[in-house]
């Protein structure tokens, strides 16, 4: 039986959706740079590189903590227990990485007018094949990520009682229009509203829900009893065999997180390196929020919910325990939480296409205004492609591809980061490492049925670890070996007689 439309919740939902739509179009004139730069990819795709600490905080948090995070993290905790909390150490580890690496990356990009990670790679190594490899990986890894934002929105729209494809198509049509008009400024401005709403929803939930269910003692007791019935590796604490995969998932995810085009777009849009460092200090506040969100998975057991899909846990919890108006507010927060990252993801992907495919291979003489026009059109195509992707293909396929995308994007880490700190590697070595790492990670993932963890059997010992991190190790080893060979060959060519090189 289909859920009846909750008109009160729907009215609240529509009100906030209209509010952010207006903000999206207003953003086209917000914090504009000089008139001479108004038709420029940096203006449209990076907000003129003019975002300060607070704007960057909301923007990076907005595209890092997505609607699907709010839906999927509690769903995973509901399904497997403690193992689902790997996202917490992952988001703790990521910020020291941001603090150490991203200001250096921003400095190189700002100095040379780079818009994408692939621009940085080409500027450092002068290799079109390596640039294309990084750009192509970024675009492919981003597409299913955008589709997952649609899944998050689809879940809450269904919880309102709406059915069919029209509501979600209309929502993304609106998103496409104001992103086209305002570029990165639209999600940056909307992120303020989104984050305030999410914080209100979560803080209210973690106080009110336990009070209605007998307190946190009852919540954990109910979850423990449910996991005991399930058996296996589920539970409130990690089993010994889960510790290594848990740790490697956290580390690998942290290394991959800011290789995605959308997170790097937020970094490149900052006005200076200190802004990035300050954000690396302040952004862990989102980790606290994420931990509270994850607890909703345990609360579902105390509420004795029965759901068809784990993804329905959070909407079902709000529909069961809160009045309609607050459910509508919560669902609007989650849906808006899909719009912000989806917009930034489509902008990041279109920047890559424009700068690292269109300009070098199609129209090398394209003007700054022409770059912006191409990027705007591509951002529409990317959103439309993600919409078709999720409407035509099973949800599980989108999730599988996103997991695979994480393995793939991690293989760009050496090419993007190593050149910031060392000059030893050449493009051929990094390209070889990328190709071998990508192939290895894909092969392991497909052999496991697109699972994020692979078990290596060495004699009588079994070692389970994150597939992406294992592939990255192979990637780096390959790059080191190939570079060693290239360096030895160069030495032999410069000094064939084996005499000391006095130069």
Image: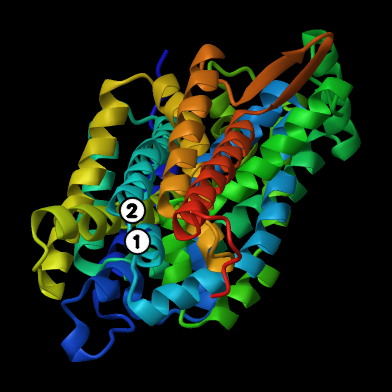
32 to 233, vertically: above or below = below
Residue at image position (16%, 66%) is 371
Residue at image position (33%, 53%) is 131
Q: Which mark is residue 131?
A: 2
Position of 232 with respect to 403 (left or right) is: right
Q: Quadrant of residue 108?
A: bottom left
Cα–Cα gap, marks 2 and 1: 5 Å
Q: Residues within 10 Å of mark 1 (few under 14, many from 20)?
A: many
Quadrant holding the C terminus: bottom right
Tag 1 or tag 2, which sits nearer the N-term?
1
Residue 397, x across and y down, in percent: 40, 21
Q: Quadrant of residue 211?
A: top right
- The residue to which callout 1 is attached is 122
Mark 2 and mark 1 residues within 8 Å of each other at the beta carbon: yes
Foreground residue, 78 or 156? 78
Residue at image position (55%, 64%) is 196
Residue 434, x across and y down, in percent: 46, 40
């Amino acid at each position: 039986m289909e859920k009846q439309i909750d008109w009160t919740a729907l009215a609240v939902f529509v009100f906030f959706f209209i509010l952010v739509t207006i903000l999206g179009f207003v953003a086209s004139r917000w914090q504009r740079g000089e008139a001479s730069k108004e038709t420029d990819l940096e203006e449209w795709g990076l907000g003129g590189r003019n975002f300060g600490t607070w704007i960057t905080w909301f923007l990076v948090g907005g595209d890092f903590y997505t609607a699907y995070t709010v839906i999927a993290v509690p769903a995973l905790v509901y399904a497997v227990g403690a193992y689902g909390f790997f996202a917490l150490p992952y988001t703790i580890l990521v910020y020291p990485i941001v603090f150490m690496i991203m200001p250096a990356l921003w400095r190189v990009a700002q100095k040379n007018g780079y818009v994408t990670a692939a621009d940085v790679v080409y500027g450092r190594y002068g290799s079109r094949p390596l640039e294309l490899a990084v750009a192509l990986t970024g675009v492919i890894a981003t597409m299913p990520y955008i589709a997952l934002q649609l899944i998050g929105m689809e879940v809450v729209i269904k919880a309102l009682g709406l059915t069919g494809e029209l509501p979600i198509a209309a929502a993304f049509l609106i998103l496409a229009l104001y992103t086209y008009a305002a570029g990165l400024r639209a999600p940056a401005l909307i992120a303020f509203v989104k984050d305030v709403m999410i914080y209100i929803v979560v803080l209210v939930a973690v106080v009110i829900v336990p009070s209605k269910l007998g307190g946190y003692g009852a919540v954990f007791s109910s979850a423990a009893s449910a996991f005991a019935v399930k058996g296996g590796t589920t539970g409130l604490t990690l089993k010994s065999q889960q510790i290594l995969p848990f740790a490697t998932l956290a580390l690998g995810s942290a290394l991959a997180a800011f290789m995605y085009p959308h997170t790097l777009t937020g970094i490149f849009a900052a006005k200076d390196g200190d802004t990035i460092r300050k954000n690396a200090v302040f952004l862990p506040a989102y980790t606290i929020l994420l931990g509270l969100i994850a607890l909703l998975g345990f609360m579902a057991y105390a509420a004795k919910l029965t759901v068809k899909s784990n993804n329905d846990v959070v909407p079902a919890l709000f529909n069961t325990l809160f009045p309609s108006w607050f459910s509508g507010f919560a669902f609007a927060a989650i849906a808006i939480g899909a719009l912000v990252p989806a917009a930034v993801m489509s902008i990041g992907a279109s920047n890559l296409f424009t700068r690292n495919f269109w300009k070098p291979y199609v129209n090398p003489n394209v003007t700054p205004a022409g770059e912006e026009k191409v990027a705007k059109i591509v951002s529409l195509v990317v959103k439309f492609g993600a919409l078709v992707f999720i409407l035509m293909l099973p949800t599980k396929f989108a999730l599988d591809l996103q997991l695979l995308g994480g393995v793939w994007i991690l293989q760009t880490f050496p090419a993007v980061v190593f050149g910031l700190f060392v000059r030893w590697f050449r493009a051929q070595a990094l390209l070889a490492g990328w190709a071998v790492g990508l192939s290895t990670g894909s092969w392991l993932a497909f052999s496991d049925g697109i699972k994020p963890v692979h078990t290596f059997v060495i004699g009588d010992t079994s070692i389970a670890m994150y597939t992406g991190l294992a592939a990255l190790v192979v990637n780096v080893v390959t790059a080191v070996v190939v570079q060693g060979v290239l360096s030895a060959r160069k030495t032999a060519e410069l000094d064939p007689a084996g005499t000391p090189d006095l130069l």
